[in-house]
Image (cartoon, rainbow, N blue to C red):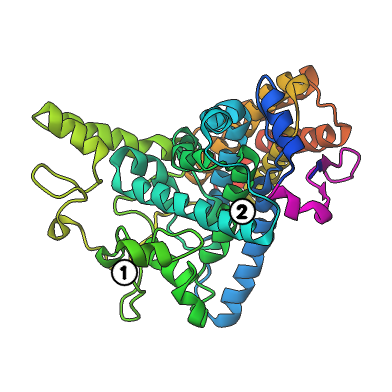
């Protein structure tokens, strides 16, 4: 399967996808595997489905707003949805820095110690791959809730105070440091790296639709699949929701291993995490819980207790079970006020434009080879800076104006010193940064809605 960036298209974010090869992307040929092994730095020939998925997710979020409005339900906070998409892009741009590292161990194990030949291209093999990858995801997901240092990373996905489709791809880049471990057993069973990479992305994309309030139930399918109803429970702070419903595609793992919980109709689910961050900076979101975990470990009197505080559940205390005593956990009940944000329509418009520019840049950079290393490094830093500034703007920081003037000025300098090979992309982002610099220099009050 080939992913061909449309460098001459009027839109920098469009890609052409050969749909006739979609099936082969999940069960690839042996030639692809040989190329994978012969490469000095293995780069699997698997398209970035989750990166493409963010563009589709933007439209799905718009449709979700319409559906909720039609149903007469409360609409999700716009800033929260934007920040979820920011985190999703943050996660994707981090891939540019860890392409070789993330699945290097998997390639090594598969190429030397696999017990079975690669699966064939039958429908049965494809379905079996869907099941076994979801089994790996179940244990990854469960560990991410029941091991403190992993939860300190995974909480980024749960820290949204809304439950909308935008949350579906909201993940921490730090998750890439350990998620691959839970798929290593697949290598022993002969599952090639390209198969695994494609199916892990499919598993992630499937879960997007389970993050919504617009779908209440899907009838008999509730017994087999992970659904919005099951996943609402998983995202709840209510005590009955904690550590439940870990399955990605299938709910049968939870029924089998005792972690299933049905949604209760008589109790409003409160979303977010028990100790909600008071800031919107996406970089802060990556580390604030980890700092709290280290502080908890340092406060304990013995070395063994300090280690246990990091490798056992977030609610663990000396003398308690792995995940802590139920009676010691906070039972959050709704309604709970959301973290306030100071933003006007102009603020939202400004951050949406810069988010789309950052996502377009990420989409452009993703397929670049080593020949584009300078472009990748420089413009990835620009993407991270843009995404971070969005969160800071929603915090109504007094440093917003000098920060944005500096960021836009430096970004314009990069555009001139390290020009992109695509004139269309370069012209688009240069226009965005130049116009933004002028706005902050002349009418900053118009962006923030008050004197800055």
Asked which quadrant contains residue 423, the reply is top right
Total labels: the figure holds 2
Instruction: Find disc 1 in the rendering and name its residue.
Output: 334
Q: Position of residue 38 (x, y in %)?
A: 71, 23
Q: Specify few, some or many for label 2: CA neighbours under 10 Å numbering under 14, 14-19, or 20 or more.
A: some
> How much space separates mark 2 and mark 1, taking CA atoms?
34 Å
Q: Position of residue 223 (x, y in %)?
A: 44, 75
Q: Work out which quarter of the rendered image holds the C terminus and state it.
A: top right
Mark 2 or mark 1, which has the lower sequence index? Answer: 2
Q: Work out which quarter of the rendered image holds the N terminus and state it.
A: top right
Secondary structure beneath label 1: loop
Q: Specify few, some or many for label 1: CA neighbours under 10 Å numbering under 14, 14-19, or 20 or more.
A: few
Secondary structure beneath label 2: helix
Residue at image point 83% right, 55% down = 20
Q: Which mark is residue 63?
A: none
Q: Is residue 201 above or below residue 370?
A: below
Q: Position of residue 225 (x, y in %)?
A: 49, 69
Q: Is residue 268 magenta?
A: no
Q: Is residue 14 magenta?
A: yes
Q: Read off the magenta span.
A: 4-27
Q: Is residue 76 above or below residue 380?
A: below
- Answer with left or right where residue 99 lies relative to residue 2: left
Instruction: Find disc 2 in the rendering and name its residue.
Output: 202
- The reply to whether discs 2 and 1 touch (Cβ–Cβ < 8 Å) is no
Q: Position of residue 127 (x, y in %)?
A: 60, 60
Q: Nearer the viewer, residue 155 or 325?
A: 325
């Amino acid at each position: 399967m080939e992913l061909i960036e449309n460098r001459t298209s009027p839109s920098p974010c469009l890609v052409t996808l050969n749909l006739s090869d979609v099936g082969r992307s999940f069960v690839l040929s042996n030639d692809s595997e040989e190329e994978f092994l012969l490469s000095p730095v293995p780069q699997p020939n698997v398209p970035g489905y989750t990166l493409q998925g963010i563009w589709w997710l933007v439209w799905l979020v718009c449709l979700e707003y319409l559906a909720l409005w039609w149903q007469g339900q409360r609409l999700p906070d716009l800033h929260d949805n934007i920040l979820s998409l920011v985190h999703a892009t943050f996660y994707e741009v981090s891939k540019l820095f860890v392409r070789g590292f993330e699945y290097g161990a998997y390639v090594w194990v598969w190429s030397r110690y696999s017990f079975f030949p690669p699966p064939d291209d039958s429908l049965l093999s494809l379905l079996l791959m869907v099941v076994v990858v979801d089994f790996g995801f179940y244990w990854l997901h469960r560990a991410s809730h029941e091991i403190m240092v992993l939860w300190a990373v995974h909480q980024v996905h749960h820290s949204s105070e809304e439950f909308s489709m935008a949350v579906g791809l909201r993940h921490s880049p730090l998750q890439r440091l350990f998620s691959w471990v839970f798929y290593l057993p697949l290598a022993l069973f002969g599952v090639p790296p390209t198969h695994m990479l494609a199916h892990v992305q499919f598993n992630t994309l499937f879960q997007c639709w389970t993050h919504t309030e617009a779908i209440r139930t899907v009838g008999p399918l509730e017994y087999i699949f992970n659904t919005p109803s099951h996943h609402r429970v998983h995202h709840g702070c209510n005590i009955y929701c904690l550590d439940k419903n870990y399955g990605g595609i299938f709910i049968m793992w939870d029924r089998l291993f005792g972690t299933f919980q049905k949604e209760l109709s008589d109790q409003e689910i409160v979303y977010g995490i028990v100790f909600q961050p008071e800031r919107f900076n996406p970089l802060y979101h990556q580390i604030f819980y980890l700092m709290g975990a280290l502080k908890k470990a340092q406060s304990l009197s013995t070395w063994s207790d300090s280690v246990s505080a990091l490798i056992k559940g977030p609610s663990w205390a000396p003398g308690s079970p792995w995940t802590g005593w139920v009676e010691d956990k906070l039972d959050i009940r709704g309604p709970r006020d959301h973290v306030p944000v100071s933003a006007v329509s102009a603020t939202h418009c400004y951050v949406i434009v810069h988010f789309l520019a950052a996502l377009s840049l990420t989409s452009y950079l993703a397929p670049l080879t080593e020949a584009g290393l300078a472009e990748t490094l420089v413009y990835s830093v620009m993407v991270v800076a843009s995404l971070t500034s969005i969160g800071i703007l929603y915090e109504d920081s007094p440093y917003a104006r000098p920060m944005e003037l500096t960021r836009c000025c430096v970004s314009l300098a990069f555009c001139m010193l390290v020009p992109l090979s695509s004139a269309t992309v370069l012209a688009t982002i240069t226009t965005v940064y130049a116009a933004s610099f002028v706005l902050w220099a002349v009418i900053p009050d118009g962006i923030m809605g008050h004197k800055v």
